[in-house]
Every structure is written in structure tokens, then in C-alpha cells.
Amino acid sequence: MFVIVGWLVALGCIFGVYIVHGGNISVILKALPFEMITIFGAAAGAFLANNQMKVVKASMAGLGRCFKGSKFNKARYMELLSLMYDLLQKVRKEGLMSIEKDVEDPHSSAIFQKYPAVGNDHHVTEFITDYLRMMVSGNLNAHEIESLMDQEIDTHHQEEHAAVAAIARLAGGLPAFGIVAAVLGVVNTMGSVGQPPAVLGGMIGSALVGTFLGILLAYGFVEPLGGLLEQKVEDAGKELQCIKSTLLASMQGYAPQIAIEFGRKVLYSGDRPSFTELESHLKKK
């Protein structure tokens, strides 16, 4: 929602001031379709040539997420920490083997299904169950599991940032493609030097629209989307770090109530539930 609002504000200010100062908007509108096809066509071709198909798909999916609200909020984190608390509390009361069925089939687990916001999230449940399974097996110590967690989080980070980098490169290329469109317009104008000055002026103005559009699309549209996607990637990584801190605290012998405090503390302040809020949520559940 805020993406569209931001675009409308930018377009309103740019074209509003242009019209108020006596600009002829028809010149831009007349050249717009041809310049857009040139710029977007060149950008799309370069984007496909520059990225593997998995990065292209991830970029398209990431751009779609930019138009949706973030799922990483205080309510989700309270569900996540409550889920971790219930799992660790069951381990503390009944032993590690008691969660074996929950780990092997989380979709049939009463604990995971008690918190559907995170219990039905494939990536979250897989991350939790993989390391709980290692804890149940007892073959790895806390330092080894921490190292493995860090490697997995880094890999996830790199995969997600590939789409961010691809969009950033696309934004960086759009002004150049705008210049390409403008140069072609100038070449076309130079081939019509015998035309009246009014006609030549219109052709030059249309050519310059290409440069304008390339810069506008890069810094007003595509680059902001890349920045927003990067923020969403960081939010997703923070959730994994929360799980990591909680499980490691439990492995080091802390009680479930203290272990989830380790996880709560790594969350961003704007999304982090307070101690009292989390405690109240746990009592209700």
C-alpha cells in the first residue's frame, strides 16, 4: 500500500510542478509508449541475460512481496516464542524423546498446529525441526549446532540477497537504457534536419523523454523496491536468529522461560513483544 502511495506522491510532485511551470504534458505522453518499450525491453533482456533463472524467479516473487504487508510483526513473534516455549517445556517435563513425533511430523503435531501462523510456515518449521532432531539424537554439542545454524542462516541470507542484488543492478542500468533511447531519438532527429524548427524541437523533446524516464524509473520506482525487498529479507533472517538463540539457550541448560528471553532479545525493537506481553500471551495459550 505504501509503495503505491509513495509512487503517487513522487509522480504528483514531478509532473505537477512541470505542468504548473507551463510544461506541455502532451509531449511526454506522446513519446511515452515508444520510450517505455525501448527502456523496458532493453532492461528485461539485460535482466534475463545477467541472472540465472532461479534468481529471476526469486526476484519476481520478491517484487510481489513488496506490495504486501510484512508478516514479521509482534503478533507473529509472540506466536513463534510461544511455540518454542511449549516445545521446550515439553522437553523439560518429559525428556527430549517426547517431542520426536512433533519433530517428525509437525503438521500433525498439536503443538505446531496450536500456532498456525508459524506452524504452517514451511521454512520456519523445517529450521526448528531440523535442529530439534539433532538435539534429540544427541550427537552434536551446542557449539557444533551453533556453527551449523550460522552456516544455514548465511546461506539463506545469500540466496535471498541474490534477488536484491539483481534488482539493484537493474535499477543501475535503467538510466543508461534511457540514454540509449534518447540517442536513438537524436539520431532520428538528425535524419530529419530539413523539417521546420517546430517539428525538430518536438522530436528533440521526445528524445529527451527517454533520459528522463530512465532516471525516473531507476530512482523513483525500481531502486525503492530493491531497498524494500532488502528490509524484508533482513526481517526473515531475524526470525531464524530468534529461533537459534532460543534453542542454544535451552541446550546450555536454561529453563524455557529464560531461553525464550534469549530469542526475544534479538528481535528488532519495533516488533519485539515486551516481557509482560509475552508472559500474558503464554498464560492465555
Image: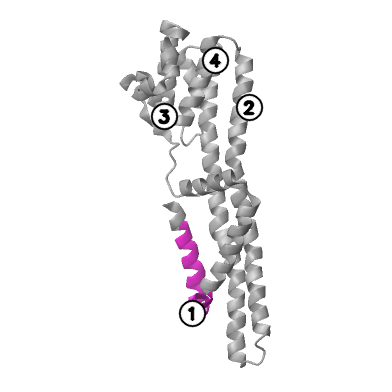
On residue 134, the disc is 4
In the image, what residue type sits under mark 1? Ser
User: How far apart, in angstroms, are the residues tagged by discs 4 and 2?
Assistant: 15 Å
Disc 3 marks a residue whose amino acid type is Val
Distance between mark 3 and mark 1 Cα atoms: 52 Å
Please state if 223 lies on the left or on the right of 106 as rendered: right
* Residues at marks 3 and 4, CA–CA distance in whole angstroms: 21 Å
Nearer the N terminus, badge 1 or badge 2?
Answer: 1
Chain-order first, disc 3 or disc 1 = 1
Residue assigned mark 2: 151
- Magenta region includes residue 183: no
Quadrant of the image containing the C terminus? top left
Camera-nearest residue between 149 and 275: 149
Q: Which residues are magenta?
A: 6-31
How far apart are the two marked residues, 3 and 2, measured between alpha carbons?
A: 22 Å
Query: Reading the chain from its start, which is encountered first: label 3 or label 4?
Result: 3
- CB-based contact (under 8 Å), mark 3 and mark 1: no
| Residue at the image position 42 percent from the left and 9 percent from the top | 98
Residue at disc 3, secondary structure: helix
Q: Nearer the viewer, mark 1 or mark 2?
A: 2
Disc 2 secondary structure class: helix
| Residue on which the image places disc 1 | 26
Residue 118 got which mark?
Answer: 3
Name the dominant secondary structure of the magenta segment: helix
- At 57% from the left edge and 40% from the top edge, which residue is drawn? 160
Q: Residue furthest top?
A: 94
Upstream in sequence: badge 3 or badge 2: 3
- Residue 240: x and y in percent read 53, 29
Badge 2: how crowded within 10 Å, few (<14), some, or many (20+)? few
